[in-house]
Amino acid sequence: MNGLRAVIVCLVIACASVVSPAVAVTPSWSALPVPAAAPPVTVSDLAARGPGEAWASGYEHATDGLRPMLYRWDGTAWSRDATFPGAGEPGWLGRVQFVGEEMWIFHNRAGAGEILRRSAGGWSSVPLPQTLWTYQDFTAVPGAAWVVGEDDTGLKVLRYDGSGWTTQATPDGVLYLMGITARTATDAWAWADTSTGTTVLRWDGAVWRDARVPLPPDSNVHTMMLEPSGRVTIGGSQYTDGVARTYLMTFNGRAWRTTYPPLGDTYTEAMERGPDGALWLPVRSDRAFQSKYAQVDGRRTTFSYGPERRDAIDVKPRALARAGSSLLSFGTVEIYGSKPNLMSERLGG
């Protein structure tokens, strides 16, 4: 009898653990209030360093031109930061990077480019050695930073080593660099438009070379993710008879693998590795009043919706960032009768 009672007690405990809300409830997206900007607004980037610090950059479309826009998440709330040099001047803010104990942002300041650096001691800036017509992308790691763009002589790749700038050459046939990212000062990657199509380049500390990545035919690249483990993930679009479909490529250190998740023609620039190890990215929503996200975990793709927003006619997450055990989203929401303004959402936390 005692043995039977023990079995029943064990079964009850096991069943309780299965249905316990702490175990069975799946984290959902929740809305985070963001102080309003002057609409319409454009979000450039979002980066996080743990659960208690994240930064979102972009610009407002003012009557006299573009104005830079910067927001900070402190683990509890979003607030606007207007303390950086040039905050009240024309221009815009681009990509955000954490470099050691500092936070770096690319800043177009009335046409001139600079890198804003924020440390415990406050703000400083590193001016570019020349003004470019276009500033396409920026990336930074300890010991190095790159800015790519164009001037009246063509393509420019500018590298900062902590003390000064150099101009780097690219392989013959490269017409334009569409994006750049880096893992270390001697390991950087870029995706380029060339005379033969889209190509991936790699910097080995001495020279830029064709990385010979077997991209799908008739395709382009939206983004690349370099992870400390050595894994590389590329997101882009392949065109067949004029119709685009999203592809993902993963390099495990030995070989490339290409997959085609059911994402339609989703633009993958905002792709992020979530706390769960899956790839997350915003997708076009079929509900005007809710955002929509895709979770790609190997061959399995699932979708989730953000919180319902009253009177919204367009909700657009623009960037994602992992913040500890949660995932932050930053973008815009258009409420009926008004111009798009800022919104933020969080999964987990």
Image: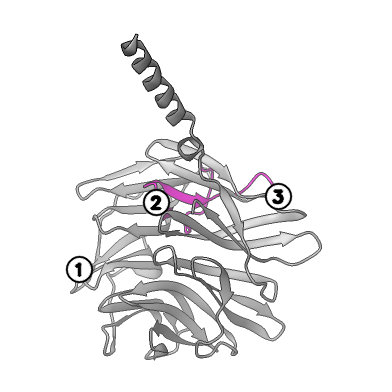
Residue on which the image places disc 3: 288
Is residue 248 in view from this perspective? yes
**Which mark is first along the chain, 2 or 3?**
2
Is residue 264 rendered magenta in the image? yes
**Along the viewing direction, whichever of 64 and 273 lies nearer the viewer:** 273
Q: In 3D space, how far apart are the residues under numbered discs 3 and 2 (Cα atoms)? A: 27 Å
What percent of the width, then of the height, locates residue 340?
70, 65
Residue on which the image places disc 2: 275
The structure residue drawn at horizontal position 56% and vertical position 84%, both measured from the top left corner, is: 82
Query: On the rendered image, what quadrant is the N terminus found in?
Result: top left
Instruction: Specify whether 75 is left or right of 188.
Output: right
Is residue 161 rendered magenta in the image? no
Q: In 3D space, how far apart are the residues under numbered discs 1 and 2 (Cα atoms)? A: 30 Å
Which segment is the magenta one?
262-289
Q: Which of label 1 and label 3 is nearer to you? A: 3
Badge 2 amino acid: Pro
Instruction: Specify whether 196 is left or right of 136.
Output: left
Secondary structure, magenta segment, majority class: loop
Badge 1 amino acid: Asp
